[in-house]
Image: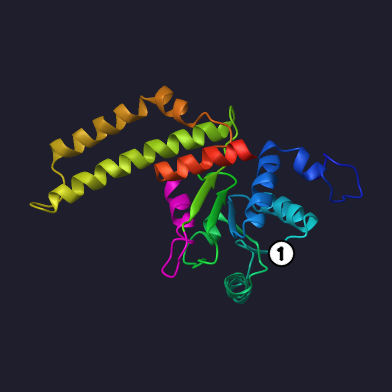
Amino acid sequence: FDGVEPEPFTPGEHIVNTSGKLVYLDKLLHKMKREGHRVLIFSQFTYMLDILQDYLDMRKWNCERLDGSVRGEDRYEAVDTFQTDSDAFVFLLSTRSGGVGLTLTAADTVVFFDSDWNPQMDLQAQQRAHRIGQTRTVTIYRLVSEGTVEDAIIGRALKKMKMAAGILENTTDKQQGKTGFNDGELRQIVNWSAAIASKEDEDEAGCNTKNSTSASSPATSAAWESLVKEL
């Protein structure tokens, strides 16, 4: 890490110890490895993927990687290797480049090391493990550092998802009769969206947890609480 460690740059435990997220991820991956899980790790930043790759090499865990710099033929080779080689423990992916159009059902665990401003990108990314052919329960973990810009990202993402859900719900209702929105309905959507945006404190209170998970069911939440206690 330029400006952080002296040259020559060498791998070591400082890679883990200088980041609260990596400390937690290290414990999580050790547990996943012991239990025979395989993991997708998403990040928005290729520089972060570089750091994670150094970390995985240090732990001597086999991994594949896919980001915007990977050529087409190498992209398919990486996916095929992960799908067919049981020794490939982790697949590192950039959220934008690796989150669309791939089938990675060999993995049953998804970790978002950081979150995208557009929640739909994260939703598409986690679907890489939720494809036809998946036979196991998929668990999603989202790492969030308390008191950072990530709080704002998660809060805005929640608002966007609420807004989208409201619009889609209204659209579904209209499909049973007329289609489209009239002027009054559009005004109602805008007012409703503004009301959601005003609930900043409520949304932030819901996401101000250090290293939280995106849970889709009470069972997932219970599993996360158990994992936190174990780690």
Q: Is residue 54 magenta?
A: no
Q: What residue type is labelled 1?
A: Asn
Kindly identify which residue carries mark 1. Answer: 62
Q: For numbered disc 1, what is the local secondary structure?
A: loop
**Residue 193 drawn above or below residue 90:** above
Residue 195 or residue 132, whichever sits in front: 132
- Give 50 or 221, whichever is nearer the viewer: 221
Give me the residue at 71% from left, 40% from top. 23
Residue placed most toward the observer, 9 or 191: 9
Which residue is outermost to the top? Answer: 201
Q: Which of 179 and 109 is in front in this view?
A: 109
Q: Give the range drawn in magenta.
A: 117-136
Q: In which quarter of the image is residue 89?
A: bottom right
Relative vertical location of residue 108 with respect to residue 72 in this rendering, above or below: above
Residue located 20% across and 34% down the image: 187
How far across and down, in percent of the image, does residue 191 sit?
25, 30
Q: Where is residue 160 in the image (x, y as percent from the top left)?
A: 38, 40
Task: Tell me: 147 left or right of 187.
Answer: right
